[in-house]
Image (tube, rainbow, N blue to C red):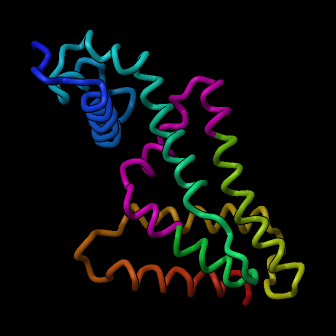
């Protein structure tokens, strides 16, 4: 397949990433070939290497960029721990509902990362978890939360919040605002406020 006329790095590069994202989410990283990604974009397989070093790099960059954007997008507000926790919950739900394919890949394809790439992604995930745990610890210290183990609560809450992407469908029984409110109510009760 010939390179499409007018194909440029600033156009084709993002198309390569979007095609990889769609295919990895639909079929799994191991089942997708560079040739399939190229066909999806409309370029020759060899042309992909102008935009990425290899398939592993594509996977790693999708995960890294997703987590870096997540970390950048939420900053704890200057508020009490209850308000910080509510901000975290609502942000997490909104952010993840807008990116279900990235969320799926970020959690399900960790096993396909090289050890070095895994360590970087694990560090970014830990940074995010640490932010939530800091809120829980502050709430615990102020007497606002009753959480016996903040690390365990952090992991449980993130798993619960992220799980929304597995069942939520736009136009379903609950809209996003109702889902946010319900999840906040469950989290609030879980931490004993």
**Residue for point 68% across, 77% down:** 84
**182 w.r.t. 32: above or below:** below
**Residue for point 68% across, 69% down:** 76
Quadrant of residue 143 within the rendered picture:
bottom right
- The total number of labels drawn is 0
Q: Position of residue 167 (x, y in %)?
A: 36, 66
**184 w.r.t. 156: above or below:** below
From the image, give the main secondary structure of the stretch colored magenta: helix
Query: Quick one: quadrant of the N terminus?
Result: top left
The magenta stretch spans residue 169? no
**167 w.r.t. 29: above or below:** below
Quadrant of residue 151 within the rendered picture:
bottom right
Q: Residue furthest top?
A: 46
What is the span of residues highlighted in magenta in the rendered image?
92-121
Position of 170 with respect to 28 (left or right) is: left
The magenta stretch spans residue 117? yes
Position of 189 with respect to 11 (left or right) is: right
**88 w.r.t. 39: above or below:** below
Position of 34 with respect to 153 (left or right) is: left
């Amino acid at each position: 397949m010939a390179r499409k006329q007018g194909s440029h790095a600033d156009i084709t590069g993002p198309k390569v990433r979007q095609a990889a994202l769609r295919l990895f989410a639909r079929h799994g990283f191991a089942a997708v070939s560079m040739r399939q990604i190229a066909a999806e974009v409309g370029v020759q397989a060899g042309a992909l290497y102008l935009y990425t070093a290899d398939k592993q790099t594509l996977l790693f960059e999708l995960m890294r960029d997703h987590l870096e954007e997540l970390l950048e997008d939420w900053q704890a507000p200057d508020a009490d721990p209850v308000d910080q926790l509510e901000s975290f919950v609502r942000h997490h739900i909104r952010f993840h509902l807008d990116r279900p394919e990235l969320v799926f890949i970020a959690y399900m394809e960790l096993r396909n990362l090289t050890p070095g790439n895994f360590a970087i992604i694990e560090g970014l995930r830990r940074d995010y978890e640490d932010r939530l745990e800091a809120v829980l610890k502050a709430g615990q210290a102020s007497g606002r939360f009753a959480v016996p183990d903040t690390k365990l609560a952090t992991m449980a809450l993130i798993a619960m919040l992220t799980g929304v992407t597995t069942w939520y469908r736009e136009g379903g029984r609950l809209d996003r605002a109702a889902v946010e409110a319900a999840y906040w109510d469950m989290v609030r009760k879980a931490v004993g406020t």
